[in-house]
Amino acid sequence: MTAFFKFRKLLALAVLICATASLSLARAESAALDAPKGPVVLSVEGRIANTNRAGGADFDMEQLQALPWVTRETYTDWTDGAQTFEGVPLQALLDAVGARGDRITAVALNDYKVGLPASDAKEHDVLLAIKHEGKFMRVRDKGPIWIIYPRDEASSTLPDRHNEKMVWQLRTLVIE
């Protein structure tokens, strides 16, 4: 066998190794999520790496409860006094779907839409509230998911600058 053919075989092998490594890396960066078993309560679409359907990720209540869960006492303009909310930090959900955008459009059941910076998730410790005062929120009670921007008692007597972003009856997040 001539040196030329040996070189071609080595080159082909190197290309195959590089392609396999690239494919493995791409698979490591994106992963399929489990499909929901119950009714879908939240859909995430857009620039995400981890999906469970074509073009997005759907979550049932069990899947959301499997994500990191926190309890927060905070104030809102729609409730009296300090209230206890439980749910998933928005950043945990963004991490779970491998979000790669800097803007999020939140869409409610009634098609109310508002944009928020993805950076708010960390900067403001935004919560996707699922329970209010220990009870799962029903649609008539701003549920099943309410975006909560926590605030302290000192600011509770002033209108919150994040009010328009505190979407209740949340159904979809679009990552842009």
Image (cartoon, helix red, strand yellow):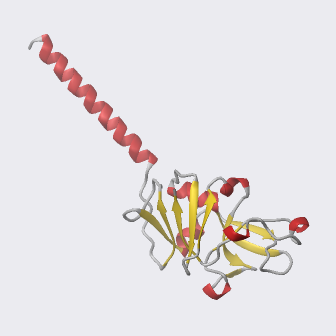
Q: Residue at x 58, y 68 (%)?
A: 106
144 left or right of 151? left
Tell me the quarter of the picture where residue 16 sits. Answer: top left
Q: Residue at x 72, y 78 (%)?
A: 132
On-image quarter of the N terminus? top left
Q: Is residue 171 above or below residue 50?
A: below
107 left or right of 54? right
Tell me the quarter of the picture where residue 96 sits. Answer: bottom right
Q: Position of residue 24 (x, y in %)?
A: 37, 41
Tell me the quarter of the picture where residue 92 sits. Answer: bottom right
Q: Position of residue 134 (x, y in %)?
A: 73, 79
165 left or right of 170? right
Task: List the single residue furthest toward the left.
Answer: 1
Q: Is residue 165 above or below residue 117?
A: below
Task: List the single residue furthest toward the top.
Answer: 3
Q: Position of residue 64 (x, y in %)?
A: 57, 69
Q: Position of residue 80 (x, y in %)?
A: 84, 81
Q: Is residue 140 above or below residue 1?
A: below
Marker count (numbered): 0
Which residue occupies the foreground of this view, 146 or 3? 146
64 left or right of 72? left
Task: List the single residue furthest toward the bottom.
Answer: 140
Q: Residue at x 35, y 36 (%)?
A: 21
Q: Residue at x 91, y 65 (%)?
A: 154
